Amino acid sequence: MIDLHFHSYYSDGIDSPADLAKKAKEIGLATVCLTDHNAINGYQEFMTAGQSLGLNVVTGVEIYTNYKDKRLHLLGYDFNPDDQDLNLILKELQEKHLPQVKETINILKNDGWKIEEKDAFAGPAAYIGMANIAGLLPKDAQNWERIKKDFNWHQGKIIPITEIIAKYFYKENKGNFSPYKNKCPIYREAEMPIEKAIKLIKQAGGKAVLAHPGQHLSWREDQIVSELKDFGLAGLEAISSHHSWQQIEHWQILAKELDLLITVGSDFHGQVPEDWQFLVRSPWDFFKINKSDSFLLFDKKEK
């Protein structure tokens, strides 16, 4: 079984790279890839732990990018993790992002939230994501009371972190790049043009794959994928936990039409605690794909 897309606490995941390797082994995964956002800081730890458990470990990263009026996520696979240019750009994205994190915290504080910079920067994350910041809010008792009131909380009700982000991290305004109508985010990711990101990954000896395309593009925008192929895009993450079965079928068909690789990714960030009593606690509970049913980027021979 394969999973080529998940995150550690070096970006906005919950687990350490070593713990992720153990969990991957426990559920029967054989080929794995850590793809932290704008960071590869956890790769060495993950590779060491994974290889000691007999896992096939592939280098990976997920870079925030933009193209035309779209914000797209780009996965890089099987590259040299010591590539100087790649490490330099990722470091620049991480540093570029710090003022945005501070600004977001200030906006939240001005909105009455109890949150401090030191708490946001206390963890191991090389790249602090929106989920990292949102996850701090319920930890304060006063914040939690506000959240419970706003969401009409009752015993047993779960308030997903995505709902907290949707409610408090977007303000009424006609802004660009927002998934919420007439709203713009108080928080923005550090990103780069996708054509430059693709070139960067290729120069590092890797392959660039568009992450969960159905989350950012509709079937009416297939031409964008064709344009990205002209820049050197190598594949599509067609089999994704973000996709419906219809989307999985669509993106596989398009990948085959364009002679692009098809990859598999859960986008796992961490399991829901057992006491939440969810039937499905994580994508890993149901997102298990057999190698014989998948197209792996390192199985396909170069033409």
Image (spheres, helix red, strand yellow):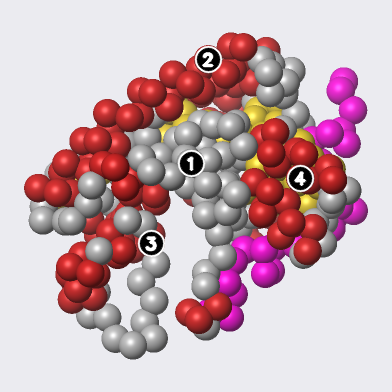
Q: Could you say whether the residue bearing mark 1 is in a helix, strand or loop? A: loop
Reading the chain from its start, which is encountered first: label 2 or label 1? 2
First in residue order: circle 4 vs circle 3: 4
Q: In which quarter of the image is the C terminus?
A: top right
Task: Give yes or no for residue 299 being in the magenta stretch.
Answer: yes
Q: Which of marks 2 and 3 is in front?
A: 2
Q: Residue 33 at x, y = what percent?
A: 71, 42
**Which amino acid type is shown beneath numbered disc 2?**
Leu
Disc 4 marks which residue?
49
Q: In this figure, which residue is indicated by the disc labeled 2?
A: 88
Per the image, the residue denoted by label 1 is 124
- Which one is closest to the eye, mark 4 or mark 2? 4
User: Label 1 sits on what residue type?
Assistant: Pro
Q: Say what amino acid the circle numbered 4 marks.
A: Ala
Circles 2 and 3, Cβ within 8 Å, touching? The answer is no
For marks 1 and 4, give the CA distance.
Answer: 18 Å
Whole-angstrom CA distance, mark 3 to mark 1, is 20 Å
- Span colored in magenta: 278-303
Q: Distance between the residues labelled 2 and 1?
A: 19 Å
Which residue position is annotated with label 3? Answer: 161
Label 4, secondary structure: give it: helix
Q: Distance between the residues labelled 2 and 3?
A: 31 Å
Q: Who comes first in sequence, dot 3 or dot 1?
A: 1
Q: Is residue 73 visible?
A: no
